[in-house]
């Protein structure tokens, strides 16, 4: 190995370690980019209909989102708070019922002990430490979300300058390709966000209405959880089904079966018809790639990694197609 190769290898290792130490900063930055793209889609829609410059269009979009949040909050939050309180009252009963069902089978005795180990001073102390850790993690996540929101607003306020900064640090022969990558990544990410937002809203409304028709408990809370977890494909919808099915278990086995069948039908409708229809012109992610990305980033970065795994894969798919496939593999 020559001295130049050794120096390049050492530089790559040091750069990799530096990026790993700054992974949370990069995660916040990418979250800000995702938010900026979402706002940029709305700004372009507004500017295409009215003659507004970008700062005024951004102000109108933020004011509209804030007003919509207030109106929806006034309509839904009282009922949502009531259902959250009801969930707090029903949760111990649900745990006891699950523990009783598990205790009826000797083969599931170990699971039963894990679910209900009993309360003693050691357990209470351990639970207290865990709650403090969760509270600290929640506060840290809230700060990161606020920083991402602020950075996203700053990015969308002047995207041309930030694009110019990226182009300026790109070697001159690759600047045209970088410009195409930025445009295609923005288009793919904006299309994915628009499609997933429509899909999540549809799942929320259908779940809320369907559970209300079935007279299942807490339909609004269950619908909201199912809608939000639609943004985490493959893992999210399955995890979201646990809440309405568990609450239906408190009522009757017949209601449990009805809710389970309803959620399975709705999941297949969303996964195989609704989402592919909304995303057919933007991006097509293979379920295996999406699941592996969620598992990998979840293991490395926790819940924020799971939430941002799919937007990152959308961007990486564009980069792989334009750089690795067209510029390297096709020419090779």
Image: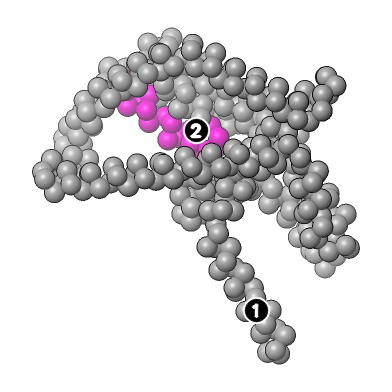
- Determine if the magenta segment contains residue 230: yes
Quadrant position of the N terminus in the picture: bottom right
Determine which of the numbered discs, if any, sits on residue 255 in the image.
none
Q: Which of 55 and 282 is in front in this view?
A: 55
Residue 60, percent from left and from top: 71, 22
Residue 151: give x, y in percent of width and height: 63, 42
Q: Which of marks 1 and 2 is nearer the N terminus?
A: 1
Q: From what the image shows, is residue 231 above or below residue 255?
A: below
Residue 310 shows in this picture = no
Write down the quadrant of residue 70 in the picture: top right
Query: Residue at the spot x=75%, y=25% of the render?
Result: 57
Q: In this view, does 291 lie to the left or right of 106?
A: right
Query: Front-most of 230 and 280?
Result: 230
Task: Using residue 58 as the reference point, say whether residue 219 is left or right of it.
Answer: left
How many dots with numbers? Answer: 2
- The residue most toward the bottom is 2
Q: 134 left or right of 182?
A: left
For label 2, the crowd category at 10 Å Cα-Cα, with few meaning under 14, some 14 to 19 and many 20 or more, is many
Residue, x 30% and y 19% (percent of image)? 86
> Residue 229: which disc?
2
Q: Mark 1 points at which residue?
A: 9
Dot 1 lies on which element?
A: helix
């Amino acid at each position: 190995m020559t001295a130049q190769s050794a120096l390049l290898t050492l530089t790559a290792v040091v750069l990799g370690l530096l990026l790993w130490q700054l992974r949370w900063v990069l995660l916040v930055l990418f979250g800000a980019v995702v938010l900026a793209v979402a706002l940029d889609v709305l700004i372009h829609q507004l500017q295409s209909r009215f003659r507004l410059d970008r700062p005024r269009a951004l102000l109108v979009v933020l004011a509209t989102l804030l007003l919509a949040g207030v109106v929806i909050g006034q309509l839904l939050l009282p009922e949502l708070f009531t259902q959250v309180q009801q969930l707090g009252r029903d949760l111990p009963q649900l745990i006891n019922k699950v523990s009783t069902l598990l205790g009826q089978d000797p083969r599931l005795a170990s699971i039963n002990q894990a679910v209900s180990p009993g309360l003693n001073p050691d357990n209470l102390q351990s639970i207290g430490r865990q709650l403090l850790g969760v509270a600290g993690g929640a506060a840290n996540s809230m700060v990161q979300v606020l920083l991402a929101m602020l950075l996203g607003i700053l990015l969308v306020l002047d995207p041309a300058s930030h694009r110019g900064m990226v182009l300026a640090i790109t070697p001159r022969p690759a600047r045209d390709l970088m410009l195409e990558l930025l445009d295609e990544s923005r288009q793919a990410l904006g299309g994915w966000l628009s499609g997933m937002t429509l899909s999540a809203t549809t799942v929320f409304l259908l779940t809320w209405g369907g559970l209300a028709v079935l007279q299942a408990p807490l339909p609004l809370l269950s619908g909201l959880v199912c809608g939000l977890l639609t943004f985490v494909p493959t893992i999210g919808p399955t995890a979201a089904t646990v809440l309405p099915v568990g609450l239906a278990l408190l009522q009757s086995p017949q209601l449990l079966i009805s809710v389970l069948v309803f959620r399975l039908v709705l999941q297949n409708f969303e996964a195989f018809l609704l989402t592919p229809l909304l995303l057919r012109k933007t991006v097509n992610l293979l379920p295996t790639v999406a699941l592996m990305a969620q598992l990998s980033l979840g293991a490395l970065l926790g819940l924020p990694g799971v939430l941002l795994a799919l937007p990152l894969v959308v961007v990486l798919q564009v980069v792989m197609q334009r750089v690795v496939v067209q510029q390297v593999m096709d020419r090779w």
